[in-house]
Amino acid sequence: MALITILNGPNLNLLGKREPHIYGHDTLEHVEALCTSRAEALGHEIRFLQSNAEHQLIDWIHEARDNSAAIVINPAAYTHTSIALRDALSAFDGPVAEIHISNVHAREEFRHHSYISAIADTVICGAGIAGYGFAIEAVSAKI
Ligand code: DQA
């Protein structure tokens, strides 16, 4: 049994209410339930977190160095802006999966570049919230 840290970036607390035509009607609580059941089926535990603050996400990545075997992260808008998040994830030794609910490549051009993808082991986008389950399976296979 391993601990998988699952991190959610800014505005994902509004999932289900925010632009449902893009992100769907499921809430972050639904995502957490999906992640819990997928991780348990694979024999793992999760630590499921969301913050709107870049420094908080970085602190949680640092904590994961000591307590987690893998990280699944939806960095949300910080995907496209944050070298600091990338550096923190680079300092994590275990597998990292980047996940986006929407297909960022089919959206505005500024969403096409990710600072995270080049250092992630797995990148999933456009699968809706099911992508979180796929990301857990991907990191689980590498633990
Ligand atoms: C997102 C895509 C990002 O471009 C956006 O800023 C988000 C959510 C997604 O899950 O599709 O907040 O990461």
Image (tube, grey):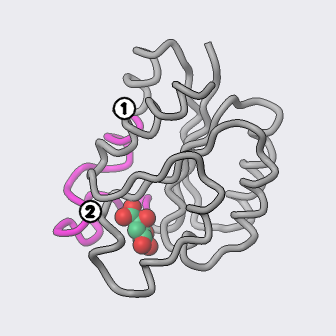
**Could you tell me which residue is drawn at 29 percent across and 69 percent down?**
18
Q: Does the magenta-highlighted stretch encompass residue 29?
A: yes
> Residue 23: which numbered mark, if any?
2
**Could you tell me which residue is drawn at 57 percent across and 66 percent down?**
52
**81 horizontally vs 124: left or right:** right
SS category of the residue bearing label 1? helix
Q: Mark 1 points at which residue?
A: 33
SS category of the residue bearing label 2? helix
Q: Residues within 10 Å of mark 1 (few under 14, many from 20)?
A: few
- Give the mark toward the camera: 2 or 1: 2
Task: Indicate which disc, 2 or 1, sits on the residue closer to the N terminus.
Answer: 2
Q: Position of residue 88 (x, y in %)?
A: 77, 57
Quadrant of the rendered structure where residue 100 is?
Answer: bottom left
Give the magenta range: 12-32
Indicate the amino acid at tag 1: Ala
User: Which quadrant of the figure contains the N terminus?
Assistant: top right
Q: Ligand 1 is found in which quarter of the picture?
A: bottom left
Is ligand 1 less than 8 Å from the beta carbon at label 2?
yes
- CA distance separating discs 2 and 1: 17 Å
Q: How many marks?
A: 2
